[in-house]
Image: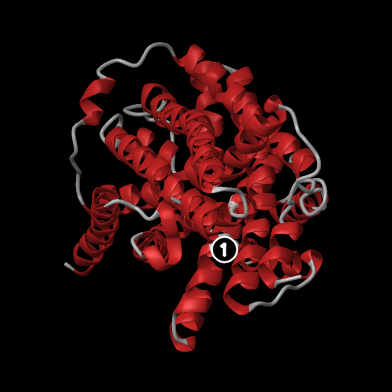
Amino acid sequence: MTESTSLAYQAGKPAPPRSSPSRLGRAYGFLGSAFVVAVAYVDPGNFATNMSGGARYGYLLLWVIASASAAAVFVQYLAAKLGIATGRSLPELCREHYPRPVTFGLWVQAELVSMATDLAEFVGAAVALNLLFGVPLLPAACVTAAVSLTILTLAPLRRRRFETVIVALILMVSAGFAYQVVRSGPPVSAGAGLLPGFAGTDSVLLATGMLGATVMPHAIYLHSALTQEHHHASVTARRKALRSSVKGLACALGIAAVINGSMLLVAAASLHGTPLPHESLADMHDGLGKVLGADTALAFALALLASGIAASSVGTYAGQVIMSGFLRTRIPLLLRRLLTMTPPLAILALGTDPTQALIISQVVLSFGIPFALVPLVLFGRRRDVMGPLTNRRLTTAIGAVVALSISGLNLFLLHQLAA
């Protein structure tokens, strides 16, 4: 068994070709994978950046969410296509085609991205448990680790069950924010937020965090692995699989975009311009309770908890793909979970402000996007790698524009901070 085949099996490869799943089952397969990826776009980092953006600047940064959501669909399309065309994940292709020092460097930054992701997920879920039950943050993070690990044990050989749990958690997040939007009322003059603009260095920092929270680099690595099982089909079947994948992405990431927009809209309508403090997720929870009622605050906390648990499970799943792809090495999930717990537990133990830690972690993710996106675009244009599914010049050009735009925003932020 080849290493890539082994990875596909470990990632939850469906039954062998002799089985004949129903059309509904095949459709759910693509939709389930898309929702697993979509978890990365509604994790606690999104709560921190989007809610902070709405509370501080009203609707000003709504255009960042809209732009980042559109870019996310395109980037995940490229990742899905790469897996279907090559039968390899992005980390595997980097290992096969790049010099060892380059591959090692890409692995190091990918692990840093993975740690930043875990930080957001653990801290977010811990804050939610604290808000709901008064559990101190450090024990709450340990509870999150135990629950997410339990869910993650479904992933290798029971992928459909794992995906079903993830879909249920995302729907829980959706229901929570749907209720909050209804309680906060129709947004007034939200359309003005679709016009690009900033209001100082702090808004640029927040916008960069929002971008990192939406176009998550670890989701690029993961999605390229989730779709590689379709590579051995005929070219016609692979094209059909790609179309089905795009439909699943449009559905799952469309829901994620609506949730992200709702976060900002609720905070802008309820907290912006009020004397209520909104520097932390706890402040926002309390503010929503005072403005919209205790039931709305409860919906916010439950949505945050569901988001943190789902995202922490998927984040570790992605970490396995990263390590096995770049290094051809796998470690037990329990050991990896213990390793990835260390940074967030240390931050919580030091008493660092959880919300600020969440925002900074998303800025780190934004700086990690080009390291995943540039190789993705470069491999996609190579016929010797992609075969008949090689990207067209227009697709490559759009990918280059997205990569340059994200890199430009990161450089602009560095310039603003240095000024």
Regarding residue 131, the answer to whether it shows in the image is: no
Left or right: residue 48 compared with residue 172? left
Regarding residue 239, the answer to whether it shows in the image is: yes
* Location of residue 337 by image quarter: bottom right
- Identify the residue shown where x is 54% and y is 46%: 40
Give the labeled residue for mark 1: 88
Of 4 and 225, the residue lying toward us = 4
**Relative height, residue 334 to residue 106 (above, below):** above
Amino acid residing under circle 1:
Arg
Q: Quadrant of the C terminus?
A: bottom left
Q: Percent from the top left, x then y, of residue 109?
A: 48, 73
**Relative height, residue 307 to residue 79 (above, below):** above
Left or right: residue 286 compared with residue 19? left
Q: Quadrant of the N terminus?
A: bottom right
**Relative height, residue 206 to residue 408 (above, below):** above
Left or right: residue 291 compared with residue 228? left
